[in-house]
Amino acid sequence: MMHQTDGWMGGWMGGGMGGGMWLLTVIGVLVVVLLVVVISKVSRK
């Protein structure tokens, strides 16, 4: 999963491949933020 993330992230940063790639970036960031929030809530218990 991480290797695929590095691959499309590198392609987006270097190539600028149209409108779809930044959507994947935004979705990826949102998923990471949600995971951090969930983990922090669980660890507080």
Image (cartoon, helix red, strand yellow):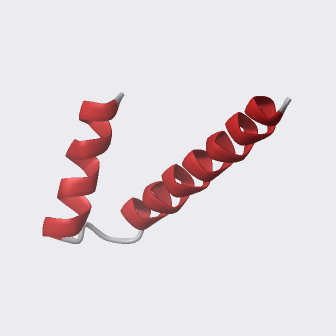
Say above or below: 31 vs 29: above
Say above or below: 26 vs 16: above
At horizontal 50% and vertical 50% (from top left) the residue drawn is: 28
Q: Nearer the viewer, residue 10 or 45?
A: 45
In terms of image quadrants, where is residue 36?
Answer: top right
In terms of image quadrants, where is residue 42?
Answer: top right
Quarter of the image where the C terminus is located = top right
Say above or below: 43 vs 28: above
Q: Nearer the viewer, residue 8 or 17?
A: 8
In terms of image quadrants, where is residue 38?
Answer: top right
At horizontal 21% and vertical 44% (from top left) the residue drawn is: 7
Q: Is residue 29 left or right of residue 30?
A: left
Q: Position of residue 20 (x, y in %)?
A: 42, 62
Q: Residue furthest left?
A: 14
Quarter of the image where the N terminus is located = top left
Q: Position of residue 30 (x, y in %)?
A: 61, 55
Q: Position of residue 37 (x, y in %)?
A: 72, 46
Q: Position of residue 21 (x, y in %)?
A: 37, 60
At horizontal 42% and vertical 66% (from top left) the residue drawn is: 22
Q: Is residue 7 left or right of residue 45?
A: left
**How many numbered circles does the render carry?**
0
Q: Residue furthest right?
A: 45
At horizontal 32% and vertical 42% (from top left) the residue drawn is: 5
